[in-house]
Image: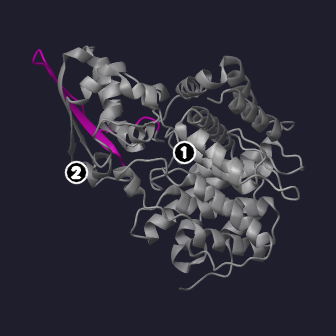
Amino acid sequence: MALISTNPVYEFLQQLSFEQIPDTVIQQAKVCLADLLATLAAGSQTPLTSIMRQLCEQQFAAGENAPQALALSGAGRLSPTGAALLDGMVIDSMDAHDGHALTKGHVGCAVLAAINSYISSTRRPVSGRDLLKYLVAGYEIGTRSGIVLHASCDDYHSSGAWNAVTCAALSADLLQLNREQFEHALGIAEYHGPRSQLMRDVDHPTMIKDGSGWGAMTGVSAAYMAQLKFTGAPAITVLAESVQSYWQDLGERWYQLEQYIKPYPVCRWAHPAIDAVIALRQQHTFHPDDVLNVQIHTFHNAARLAQKIPHSTDQAQYAITFPVAVALCYAQVLPKHILEAGLQDQAVREMFGRIDIIEDPHLSARFPAERLARVSIQLKQGESYHSEPFIARGDPQNPLTTQQTKEKFYSLTRPVWGQQTAADIDQLIEQLDQPDSDAKTLLSMVRQASLNGAP
């Protein structure tokens, strides 16, 4: 395979400064950061979190003469790789974080985990502007990495697969590795990255999710390995001549602006159906008890989501029938509905049996650029209501308002952190682009909130 002699990712990171990033991109980065931290708060209530805290404290505790990191998710002093693993998995345990249509996955989850693993382990001061710069860089590199991998590989791999390279690049730059070490870090991460076959978890939902924690851990590990002179084969998703068209607009086209924000903490593929159901319910003001039958016409991947009563939050998050039933009953879907306690809701269980999922080949043909669903609802009294194909709210072409993103932030954080702490963290995020802002203050407050809110 022919390789290029320059590395577009290395050059991008070497040249990027906060001042070069458009203000609209910085503002969107703050929105995505708030969304990730809110998802972390909600994710801290899942069974996965207590398991991973125990595992990381047992297996990834920091040595006396090694870098010591502090996970945002709350735990003892860990190695940077352990902190990245824990935070990536906790955020990923609640499927409420942002994503990008063409990556068919999530950038920010692993990126934030990797950035915090460095910031919490270094004695160097880190400004809020530095945090935002690296977050933006992660979205730009990560989105392209995901698109490249999907374009160059027939199998559908998880976000962790391509974010391993992203996290290696950010970590290598933060550790100030030279160009040769940087190249090896990317190669190590690409080679060792978790090529998780995501549809296996869609068919059998469990705690493995989108591989983001493992991808973050792999990328951070790769940078430290390269620092010690470990070598790796070239990262072909970055250096192959055949993929350069995906990298040539790095620093010009800002994919940060093209991420979607999810209103509901379940797989994005279920969102168009949820939105269509809620819209019909609000438009026609029928009572849930009046519903006789609901037909959801959607694309193939969405129809692959679970259509059985879930027995765990992981099954509920990778489902379509269950969150649609929740939406029909309550006109919203919140973490409390898909955590274990919410799975026993009798009204939702009764609604569940009235819903049919139908794959529509015309909608399947428009995936992944478009993810659509249309809904038909028949009432017991005989009335029928039908929607047009719905595109999910939160997409760049159908964005949430500022008020809606704030409402989501507080709906996820307030039950875990409390109103005052959530407001304080929200304010610190808003101020990150100010010259005197401090990233460590924000991240330390999140960490303490995670410890205080631990189940």
Q: Which residue is mark 1?
A: 92
Residue 204 on image: x %, y %: 36, 50
Which amino acid does the dot numbered 2 rest on?
A: His
Find the distance from the CA under tag 1 to the CA under tag 2.
Answer: 31 Å
Residue 353 highlighted magenta (yes or no)? no
Question: Residue visible at 35% across and 46% down?
Answer: 371
Q: Nearer the viewer, mark 1 or mark 2?
A: 1
Look at 67% across and 49% down and name the residue there: 56
Task: Give percent across and percent down for residue 29.
Answer: 65, 42
Residue 402, by quadrant, is top right
Q: Going from the N terminus, do you reach mark 1 or mark 2 first? A: 1
- Outermost residue toward the bottom in this view: 2
Residue 291 vs residue 23, the one in the foreground: 291
Q: Is residue 174 above or below residue 26?
A: below
Q: Which residue is mark 2?
A: 362
**In the current view of this chain or complex, which residue is farthest to the left?**
382
SS of the residue under disc 2 = helix
Q: Quadrant of residue 180?
A: bottom right
- In-front residue for pair 145/290: 290
10 Å neighbourhood of mark 1: few (<14), some, or many (≥20)? Answer: many
Image: magenta residue range: 370-394
Q: In this view, which residue lies farthest toward the front?
A: 58
Does the magenta run of residues contain 379?
Answer: yes
Which secondary structure, mark 1? Answer: helix
Residue 21 in sight in this render: no
Judge whether residue 455 can be spotted in this image: yes
